[in-house]
Structure formats: structure tokens, C-alpha cells
């Protein structure tokens, strides 16, 4: 398994190593011990979610301000999605920056998202299925969203025309409006949190 930090701090790109023989192939798709070694702190998952989306669906950009912080571990278990993570932590050096990666069922790759980041994805295939673990249970009091078309984030959704969105995502505010409303997570300086290493194989 190869674990690499993406362009945003603490956001990890995880690629399993497949072993092939006459029967097919096998891979370890999740290794908590390796993740914890890279992150430098223990992980605990409280809930698992799965979504199935028609092609051209955009889900996001969603984030949590749970007091305990909500981390996510995201995989695509059928089809292909363009997965996007944005830093929405107030006062963060990478505030309003985003990073994206293609997740596919064929590759079995995943992305780890630390607390304080917004997450969304574009379904690139029909019936794209995304499964993810979250470190805190769903609580609507702490759940918020930013419009996926926020000009400050400037996310290029693969040039998709006429995407499919929920009414909730269509009505989601822009980043500056959410900041003025005081509903964004707050940046924690690096000296107060564990810093992940660049790569683990």
C-alpha cells in the first residue's frame, strides 16, 4: 500500500498494491496501522455511508464543524468519480485551496480527509458508488456546505455541463458568506497537531 500526502496538508492519497494470480487479484484496501503511522495519531471510525449517483451528479462541498472534528476515508466501490477536497479552515495558510483526484473501483484507491476540510465529488460514470467512513456520527447541527461553484474555490468540475445537484447543494452559500456567518471550522497551527509524513509504502 502506498500512502502519499496530496497538495493539501494532511490529505492523503492511498493506493493499494494488487497481487494477481490465476484466480484473479487481491489487495489490502485498508490498513489502519499504516494510516496511523503516517498521521501520527490514532483513528476511530463512528459511521459508514454509501451513495450511488447517476452520471454528472455533483455531491458537495460538505463539511462538519463537529467539536471533535470529523475525518473521512473515501473510496469508490463502483465506477469512477472525481473527488475534491477543499481547505475551509479559517486562517489556514491553504484556505480556499483545493485538491482533486480520480477514485475508481478498478484501482481501489482512496482519500483520507482530515477534520476541517470540505469534500465533494463528481460522478463520472452511471451508478457510481462511493463508500466512506466518518469519525463522528451524522449530526445536522454540525453539518454545513459550500456551493460547489464558489468562485473563491474555483473548482473546475471537469467542464461538466448541466450537472445534477440536490436542492440543498444548489442553495448552499459561498465561502465568504459562510465565513461571515461564523460557520466555518477554525485552523489549528501545526505545532498543536501531528504532522503526517510525505509517503509510506
Image (cartoon, helix red, strand yellow):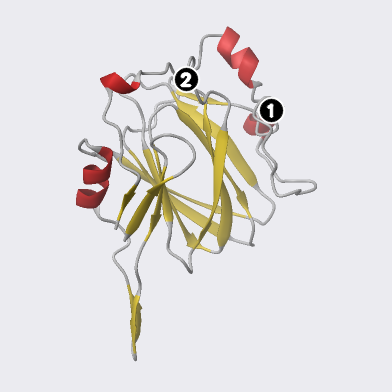
* Above or below, 185 relative to 128: above
Q: Identify the element where label 1 is drawn.
A: loop
Q: Position of residue 124 (x, y in %)?
A: 64, 57
* Above or below, 56 relative to 10: below
Q: Which residue is mark 1?
A: 150
| In the image, farthest residue toward the bottom | 22
Q: Quadrant of residue 10?
A: top left
Q: Residue at x 31, y 70 (%)?
A: 27
- Disc 1 residue crowd, few under 14, some 14–19, many 20+, Cα 10 Å: some
Q: Quadrant of residue 180?
A: top right
Q: Nearer the viewer, mark 2 or mark 1?
A: 2
Q: Residue at x 55, y 40 (%)?
A: 99
Q: Nearer the viewer, residue 137 or 116?
A: 116
Direction from residue 128 to residue 45 in the image, left or right: left
Quadrant position of the C terminus in the picture: bottom left
Q: Position of residue 67 (x, y in %)?
A: 33, 18
Direction from residue 165 to residue 107 in the image, left or right: left
Q: Which residue is mark 2?
A: 92
* Above or below, 15 relative to 74: below
Amino acid at each position: 500500500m502506498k500512502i502519499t500526502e496530496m497538495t493539501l496538508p494532511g490529505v492523503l492519497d492511498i493506493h493499494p498494491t494488487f497481487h494477481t494470480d490465476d484466480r484473479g487479484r487481491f489487495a489490502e484496501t485498508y490498513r489502519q496501522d499504516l494510516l496511523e503511522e503516517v498521521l501520527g495519531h490514532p483513528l476511530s471510525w463512528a459511521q459508514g455511508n454509501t451513495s450511488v449517483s447517476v452520471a454528472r451528479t455533483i455531491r458537495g462541498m460538505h463539511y462538519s464543524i463537529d467539536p471533535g472534528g470529523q475525518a473521512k476515508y473515501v473510496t469508490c466501490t463502483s465506477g469512477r468519480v472525481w473527488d475534491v477536497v477543499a481547505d475551509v479552515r479559517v486562517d489556514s495558510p491553504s484556505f480556499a485551496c483545493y485538491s482533486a483526484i480520480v477514485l475508481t473501483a478498478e484501482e481501489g484507491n482512496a482519500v483520507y480527509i482530515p477534520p476541517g476540510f470540505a469534500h465533494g465529488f463528481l460522478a463520472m460514470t452511471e451508478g457510481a458508488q462511493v463508500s466512506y467512513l466518518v469519525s463522528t456520527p451524522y449530526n445536522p447541527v454540525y453539518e454545513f456546505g459550500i456551493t460547489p461553484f464558489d468562485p473563491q474555490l474555483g473548482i473546475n468540475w471537469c467542464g461538466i455541463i448541466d450537472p445534477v445537484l440536490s436542492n440543498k447543494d444548489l442553495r448552499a452559500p459561498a465561502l465568504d458568506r459562510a465565513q461571515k456567518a461564523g460557520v466555518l471550522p477554525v485552523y489549528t497551527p501545526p505545532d498543536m497537531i501531528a504532522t503526517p509524513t510525505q509517503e509510506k509504502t
